[in-house]
Image: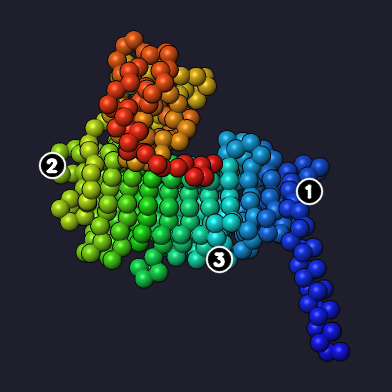
Amino acid sequence: MRRELSHIVLIATVFLLAVVSISPAKIIRVDDDADADFGTIQAAIDAAEDNDTVLIAPGTYTGDGNRDIDFKGKEILVRSQDGPETCVIDCQSPTNSGLQTVHLQRYRGVHFHSGEGSGSILQGVTITGGSAPGNEPGGGILCDGASPRIVDCVLRGNRARRGGGIGLVKSAAQLERVTIVNNTAADGGGIGYGYNRLDASTALFVRCVVAGNHAEYHPRYGGEGGGVLVEGYARFVNCLIVGNRAGYRGGGISSRMFEQSCSFENCIVWGNEQGLELYGDGHQVSTSSSHGAIYVSNTVIQDEGQGEHISDPEQGLHGNWFSSDPCFVQPGRWESNGTPDSWLDDVWVDGDYHLQSQAGHWDSDTAGWVVDDLTSPCIDAGDPNSPIMYEPFPNGGAINIGAYGGTLEASKSYFGTPLCETIIAGDINGDCKVDFEDLAILMRHWLQSAGQMPD
Ligand SMILES: [Ca+2]
Ligand SMILES: [Ca+2]
């Protein structure tokens, strides 16, 4: 009898599990008008279950319920309907010029702190006006003991003591096509790792743009890592770290490593600046490693002479890199606001980081190809073993360096005039002839399979 009962319980349990597992994933709509399921992003997340999608209508979202957003550990996709240009989370934190005044209430965009993994996805939103309370890291987003995926987002105009755009503590977050621009912190203007050398983060950044962020120098602290402050492991693939400023050292990247290392593949580190008259080092990269290292491959790092590209190239930097102007269509820039001696009131002007090409670069404004007078050395200069993915023909048979490498917006390969309009079978690189170069590309990739293409 007891045995039969346990069978019944078992069958009932299996049935219940089956019912639960086949309950279809829901799409929960957020809009600030009355027709939507919910008026705030947090209310929609609170109602969501694993595998659901929270779909955010275009608009600017402010106030409680639309800031300090908490996924609560759920494996859900929270995404905008039409992308980050039209879906803005404005945290409206107070913007006093002093870095962090303790008594003022501050709000982040999203705070991941419940062990979220790669099944928790934030996609297609802009987060601005965020600020971390007190000395906590992560002004726009903080991942604390959580490793979500953050895709197609823009983090702009946020601030924190460390990691103005995003802070990472014990996190293996994956950021893909995230633009981290014009954020401010004492250390790590754009990206800042948390204060934990033992449980270091291991984040992955793919096709991210880290531009125009500022690590502010204060008389007793700060000013390190204008774009990125890494204190742990990090891997950057096809990323740009450009036009950032550090009041003290490491205009682009400051790496404080102990046993850890970080790597840069197919990246550009260019046009970053360190303190004006301070005693720091490393306009582009500053390393204060004792055992760790930075590994670079197929990466451009600006060299301004006198070894100013990096504080200690002998100790800190390994691999292959070169220093040539990447020939962006239009680099971003700082306007001095009439006070060239002070950075604090400067205004960042966005750039266009497509690469110039005599065979054409993608122009987002006209949604067409524009031919330039010169061709960037970054075109086809990425890792020859990297998949070319969506690069349009002629793509040289090799991925481009930079944030558009491998995408439909990759600048085209130029082999001299006239441009070849006809595709010849076997012409892999697109130079209008079939020869040993095509064979070499073929052999390099012989028996590779594309596997699952990323989004
Ligand atoms: Ca290419
Ligand atoms: Ca060819």
What's the CA distance linking mark 3 and mark 1?
27 Å
Look at the picture and state if 212 lies above or below 44.
above
Residue position marked by numbered label 2 in the rendering: 306
The quarter of the image holding the C terminus is: top right
Residue at x 84% of width, y 79% of height: 8
Callout 1: helix, strand or loop?
A: loop
Q: Which residue is mark 1?
A: 37
Question: Across the whole image, how many numbered discs are drawn on residues?
Answer: 3
Residue drawn at x 28%, y 27% is: 437
Residue 294 appears anywhere in the view: yes
Secondary structure type for disc 2: loop
The residue beneath circle 3 is: 115
Q: Amino acid at mark 2?
A: Gln
Residue, far left: 306
Instruction: Pick whichever of labels 3 and 1 is earlier in the sequence.
Output: 1
Residue 350 appears anywhere in the view: no
Q: How packed is label 1: few (under 14 Cα within 10 Å), some, or many (20 or more)?
A: some
Residue drawn where x is 61% and y is 63% of the image = 73
Q: From what the image shows, is residue 441 above or below residue 27? A: above
On screen, residue 121 above or below 384: below
Residue 2 placement (x, y as % from top left) = 83, 89
